[in-house]
Image (spheres, coloured by chain):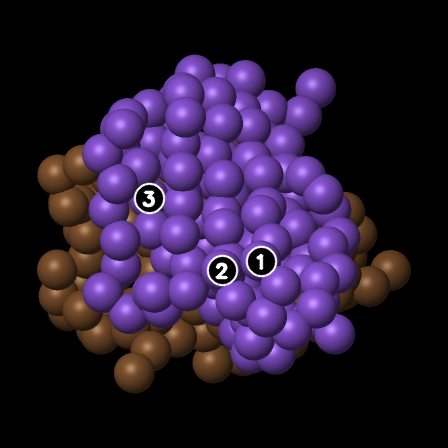
Chain colours: A purple, B brown
Amino acid sequence: DAMVIQNPRYQVTQFGKPVTLSCSQTLNHNVMYWYQQKSSQAPKLLFHYYDKDFNNEADTPDNFQSRRPNTSFCFLDIRSPGLGDAAMYLCATSPFNQPQHFGDGTRLSIL
Amino acid sequence: DQQVKQNSPSLSVQEGRISILNCDYTNSMFDYFLWYKKYPAEGPTFLISISSIKDKNEDGRFTVFLNKSAKHLSLHIVPSQPGDSAVYFCAASANTGTASKLTFGTGTRLQVTL
């Protein structure tokens, strides 16, 4: 019954090797968000899509990109992962101005 | 520069008693506040919210209080149950016009003991 699905749950990549994290939703929400959460820290918004309009947070590193090919899917691309990018990545969706629904996250490890 | 602060990393409460989780914020532009609950290996789940035009919102065992002058909100859980044991995140939102972008606190781990 999962409504926001993140794949994979665990991802290991090598330092500098591009990696893509996936998020899909069955809720038909027009807003999708990506958050980064490091250990014992607050989830931090990286960017969001309102329909196809992309909105980047000012302090999101250029290394992080996103794609939303359709309403259901959104991808997070990390072009050249560094050790500091190891974190839990959370995807969320919402209708406009409503509480966000989160997926269970992808834990990214960098070797 | 944390705009949303949860100063208690953990809280332990006996079953049946009241749990009070606190949250402070610094940004006057925040107009909507939410509490999320998170179990291990799962994503945060929305629990309850309050608009800045109200000072209290109640949903069953959960009540959120907002004190705008003090920039403080609290979540009360009465009575506490073992299934309430989780990490609770406070979040605040300032409407951007396209989405409600959330700023989270670092969370409080609640342990409800028998």
From the viewer's perspective, tell me whether residue B23 is left or right of residue A21.
left
Label 2 to label 3, Cα distance in Å? 18 Å
Is residue B14 among the parts visible in the rendering? yes
Q: Earlier in the sequence, mark 2 or mark 3?
A: 3
Label 3 to label 1, Cα distance in Å? 21 Å
Q: Quadrant of residue A62?
A: bottom left
Q: Earlier in the sequence, mark 3 or mark 1?
A: 1
Taking depth in this image into account, of A49 and B102 the one nearest to the observer is A49
Question: Residue type at mark 3?
Answer: His
Image position of B95 with respect to A46: above or below: above
Q: Quadrant of the N terminus of chain A?
A: top right
Taking depth in this image into account, of B43 and B11 the one nearest to the observer is B43
Which residue is found at the position 63% from the left and 32% from the top?
A5
From the viewer's perspective, tell me whether residue A24 is left or right of residue B100.
right
Are there few (<14), some (14-19), or many (20+) residues within 10 Å of tag 2? some
Image position of B2 with respect to B27: above or below: below
The residue carrying mark 3 is A48
- Secondary structure beneath dot 1 equals loop
Taking depth in this image into account, of A31 and A23 the one nearest to the observer is A23
Residue A42, how many percent across, how many down? 48, 68
From the viewer's perspective, tell me whether residue B110 is left or right of residue A58.
right
What chain is tagged by disc 3? A
Image position of A49 with respect to B23: above or below: above
The residue carrying mark 2 is A79
The residue carrying mark 1 is A18
Q: Quadrant of residue A83?
A: bottom right
Question: Residue type at mark 2?
Answer: Arg
Q: Nearer the viewer, mark 3 or mark 1?
A: 1
Which residue is found at the position 33% from the left and 24% from the top?
A30
